[in-house]
Image (cartoon, rainbow, N blue to C red):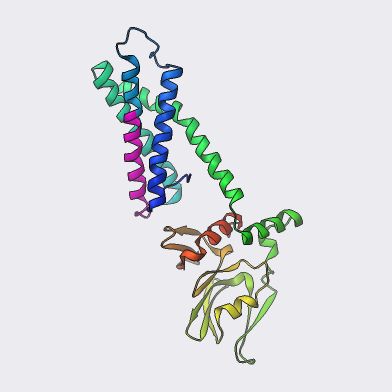
Amino acid sequence: MNLWLKDDLTSRKIMIQRAVLFSTVTLFVLFVFQPFGTNNHAIPYKFLRLSGYGLVTFCALLLSGALEIVSTRLKINNKFRLIVIPCIYIGTVSVFNHSYFVVAIFGNWYWQNQFLFVLYTLAIGIFPIIFIYLINHHARKTTLVPQVIEVENTINNNKETLANIEPKPSQLLTLTGENKGDKIQVALSQILYIKSADNYCELAVFNDKIISHQLLRSSLTSILKQLPKKSLVLRCHRSYAVNLALVETSSGNAGGLKLVMNTVGVTVNVPVSRTYVGTIKQALLLVPKAC
């Protein structure tokens, strides 16, 4: 179960599963522990009324999930998203439950009670939230593609970071084209991306706060074979390879993922095709952030 929803069919299924899970937990807490004064035996049709909280929680989570999916179409900063999305869930669930409380039990609306329902939502929801987070954390560790697992094992065994695996800027590589006299010398750590076009490859190189573009008559596959095996320059598209150490953020979903590289004030978007989405996403988890 993913922690963040995306605009796809899988996320819509997860949204329904999540709503069922949270509403079930709500009913379990209310039926078994009967908190917040619900242990009063004088309440007529008590368990029937308590069942209503499960239904409104289910509806509130469906609405919150739909709003989260809609938010993926907006360009929202990840840190801001980390604040906004939980607030949408907590606010929507607490408003729905307080509204049901007013209609079914209390009969009057008080803002003080609304604040209490926000606290109730946090108290009940914290357990399934932690549960989902732990599932996602475990899934990241157990579903890494073989290429990423190999990189991770190398780091653990040698006690090195991926940054130390890369050649130092002073160590130049010589890339050879189809014509033996066609050569380019470049530091691997300074390659921003490689783009294939017709019979040529364009290397975007970052050096001294300047991005230069160099052409080499060669296929992308041939150039990648000339790079070290533990290079962070990985293929992400039929026509692109990218230096993961220089990726700032990623945006989009499996159908249109893009890697954003912001160097010396110039933003570059590198596409990722569906075939490479899983590999790139998992590899980025292991790459230290570029300074």
Q: Is residue 34 above or below residue 90?
A: above
Residue 84 in view: no
Residue 216 in view: yes
Question: Residue 284: where, in percent of width, then height?
Answer: 56, 58
Q: Is residue 146 above or below residue 65?
A: below
**In this rendering, would 280 be left or right of 117?**
right
Q: Nearer the viewer, residue 187 or 162?
A: 162
- Give the residue displayed 50% in from the left and 30% down from the top: 127
Q: Is residue 249 above or below residue 177?
A: above
**In this rendering, would 103 be left or right of 213?**
left
Residue interval drawn in magenta: 55-75
Q: Which residue is the extreme one toward the right?
A: 158
Write down the quadrant of residue 207 in the picture. bottom right
> Which secondary structure class fits the magenta region best?
helix
* Quadrant showing the C terminus: bottom right
Question: Residue 34: where, in percent of width, then height?
Answer: 42, 16
Question: Residue 271: where, in percent of width, then height?
Answer: 45, 67
- Give the residue displayed 40% in from the left and 16% down from the top: 36
**In this rendering, would 27 be left or right of 233?**
left
State yes or no: residue 78 in magenta.
no
- Give the residue displayed 49% in from the left and 73% down from the top: 238
State yes or no: residue 73 in magenta.
yes
Q: Nearer the viewer, residue 212 or 251?
A: 251
**In this rendering, would 281 be left or right of 232?**
left
- Give the residue displayed 41% in from the left and 61% down from the top: 255
